[in-house]
Image (cartoon, rainbow, N blue to C red):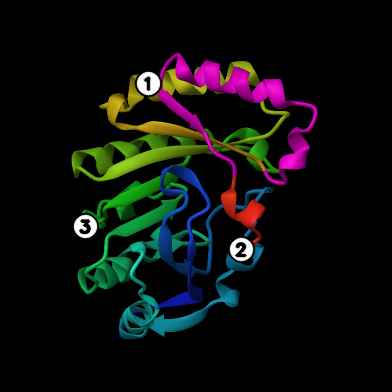
Amino acid sequence: MLEAPIVEIFSSIQGEGLLVGRRQIFVRFAGCNLDCNYCDTEDSKSVKNGELKSVDYVVDRINSLKTEDLHSISFTGGEPLLYADFIRKVIDRIDTPSFLETNGTFPNEIKKLDNLDYVSLDIKLPEHFDGDYNNKIFDREIESVNILLENSIKVYCKIVLFPESGLDYVENLASRMSNEINDKDLVSVVIQPVSPISRWKNSKDLLFKFSQAIGKYMDVLTIPQLHKFLEIE
């Protein structure tokens, strides 16, 4: 029987990205291949923090949480692509649009999920890690974006920016995205100012500069974490 480590399944409002404000049911998986220093779901990093659940259990739990305003089911983590086979089976059994939140570093796994509807794919920066940054991460992220586009799946890229992030580096990254994404006009970039937003108190003008730099090459929006303001999960 196929199982996956689940931290929690709950209903709430999406607080990030292009689906911000939408009612979703969140399926949070345990375990992640990266160790980002800004992560706000520390309990989902380790597989040990999850409880093994079956596809039947997850589907039944989703059905029990459905509300009239439900937009989609969010598969999040951790890194949900560690459990792509499991997610595919769940999606095949629900009649609600699916939404994947991923770091995009498993292109071979994302190929298995051609039944997705929406994807939020993180673009990682060197300052997201306390250790060395692996340049292959970006290549895998872009490969994943292109796989999703080939399968006509709606995808946007999210970049968590720090006040300390390098403006020139971010602009060069956007230029590379523009050149390497097969159909860049179908992909928006969401700037997510790192939380807490108080970190930006003395750097508000920098947000405009980041937006302008990315906007030279890609469609760009700046969206902070809504759920932090609402103080909801």
Q: Is residue 133 visible?
A: yes
Name the residue carrying label 2: 232
Compared with 2, 164 (above or below) is above
For residue 115, the mark is 3
203 relative to 66 in the view: left or right? right
Extreme-front residue of the structure: 68
Image coords of residue 91 (percent x, y): 26, 67
The crowd level at tag 2 (other Cα within 10 Å; few <14, some 14-19, many 20+) is few
Amino acid beneath label 2: Ile
Any magenta on residue 216? yes
Compared with 188, 39 (above or below) is below
From mark 2 to mark 3, how far is it between C-alphas? 29 Å
Callout in the foreground (2, 1): 2
Q: Earlier in the sequence, mark 1 or mark 3?
A: 3
Image coords of residue 74 (percent x, y): 40, 61
For residue 18, the mark is none
- Which residue lies at the image location 35% right of the left edge and 75% below the top edge? 66
Question: Camera-side residue: 152 or 46?
Answer: 152
For residue 178, the mark is 1
Compared with 167, 182 (above or below) is below
Callout in the foreground (2, 3): 2
The crowd level at tag 1 (other Cα within 10 Å; few <14, some 14-19, many 20+) is some
Quadrant location of the N terminus in the rendered image: bottom left
Give SS at disc 3: loop
Amino acid beneath label 1: Ser
The crowd level at tag 3 (other Cα within 10 Å; few <14, some 14-19, many 20+) is some
From mark 1 to mark 3, how far is it between C-alphas? 26 Å
Question: Camera-side residue: 77 or 191?
Answer: 191
Q: Earlier in the sequence, mark 2 or mark 1?
A: 1
- Which residue lies at the image location 59% right of the left edge and 76% below the top edge? 48
Image coords of residue 220 (percent x, y): 45, 27
